[in-house]
Image (tube, rainbow, N blue to C red):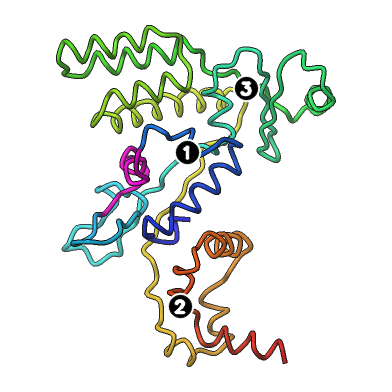
Amino acid sequence: FLAAGPVKGARLKPIFVSEFERQSGESFARSFWSFPKFSDLLRSMPDLVEVIPPNGPGDITVRLWVTPSSVASPSSTASPVPAPIKFIPSPLWHAFTNPDPKRRRYYHRKTSDVIHYVDGDGSELGKAFAAKVATDPSYVEITPISPLEQSTWMQEFLSAQSLTERTRSSLDGITEVPYSSQINKAFAAALGERAGDWRSFRISKVHAKIQEWATRYGLHILQAVHTQEPAIAARPSETTALQKSEVASTSPIDAETRRLLHAVVDALEPRELANVLVPASVLSRIASAHH
C-alpha cells in the first residue's frame, strides 16, 4: 500500500490492522499489546518505514524507508532511484519463526502457498493437508528456526550493546527463558529505544536462514518492493477536463488497487467519509450509468 506513496497514519492503521488479522488470523490488539500507539509500532520498524512527524498539531505521515545511497546527489540531474526493499511474505515468515515443534510446514514451488498442520492431527483438514503434500512433489518442507537458535540471536545482540549492569541482567534473564513469540515481544519491550535495532538484527538473521533454505531447493523467495514518489493528484476541477482515455492511459487501476481502495473506504468513519474527495468525472460516469 505504501509503495504508491506516503500515507497519513490514520489512513494506514485500519488497512494495516485489517490485513494483519486477515493474513495471520490473530488479533492485532493482542499481538501488539506492547505498543500503546500505532506510531510506536511503526517507529519500531525503521528498516521498513519512515515516520514523519507533523509540523505542529496533526497526524504523522508514513512512507517506505529508502536507503540514503539510493537518492541522487543534489548536483545530479538524474531522477532518484529508490533502492529495492526485500521482504518475506507473512505466511512464510511465520512458518520459519514459529518454533512449534509439532507443526509441519510446506511451501509450494509454483503457487508460493504455505500450508501447515500438526503432525499426527487426526482431523479431516489435517489428513487432507498430509495427503496433499504427500502426492504433490511441488511442496517443499520448511524447517523452522529452532528456539535455541533464536535465543542465541538475543544473546549475540546483547553482547554487542553497551548496557548498564542492571539492564543487562534483566535482559539476560529473558534470554534464558525458552524462546517463544511472547518472549521475543518481552525482549523487544525491555530493550526500549534499542528495540528497532534488535528488530533489524533479527530480520537479517531470519532472511539469511530463509535464503539458505531457498538456495538449497533452488527457490527465489525474497521479493523486491520498489518505492516511488507519489504522483501529484489533480484537483477535482482539473480532473473534469481529462478525457476518459487519458485517465485510463495514465492511471491504470488493477484488481489489487481496487481492493485496497475498497478496504480504505470500508475502514473510514462517517465523519472521515465526509472529507473524501471524488473526481467530478467519476461522479458523472456513475450518474450516466444509473440513467
Q: What element carries label 2?
A: loop
Magenta region, residue range? 36-52
Please tell me whether mark 1 or mark 2 is closer to you in this view. 1
Whichever of labels 1 and 2 marks the residue nearer the N terminus, that label is: 1
- Reading the image, the residue beneath label 1 is 29
Foreground residue among 231 and 103? 103
Please tell me whether mark 2 or mark 3 is closer to you in this view. 2
- Residue at point 35% right, 16% down? 154
Q: Residues within 10 Å of mark 1 (few under 14, many from 20)?
A: few
Foreground residue among 70 and 122? 122
Quarter-of-image position of residue 214? top right
**Does residue 179 show up magenta in the picture?**
no
Find out whether the residues at labels 1 and 2 contact each other: C-beta distance under 8 Å.
Answer: no
- Reading the image, the residue beneath label 2 is 277
- Reading the image, the residue beneath label 3 is 142
Foreground residue among 144 and 7? 7
**Does residue 47 show up magenta in the picture?**
yes
Find out whether the residues at labels 1 and 3 contact each other: C-beta distance under 8 Å.
Answer: no
In the image, 257: left or right of 105? Answer: left
Q: How far apart are marks 1 and 2 (CA)?
A: 31 Å
Is 245 placed above or below 267 here? below
Q: What element carries label 3?
A: strand
- Residue at point 59% right, 16% down? 100
Quarter-of-image position of residue 248? bottom right
Where residue 148 appears, as percent x and y from the top left, is 46, 9
The disc labelled 1 sits on which kind of residue? Ala
Quarter-of-image position of residue 53? bottom left
The disc labelled 3 sits on which kind of residue? Ile
In the image, 14: left or right of 169? Answer: right
Where residue 201 appears, as percent x and y from the top left, is 34, 27
Whichever of labels 2 and 3 marks the residue nearer the N terminus, that label is: 3
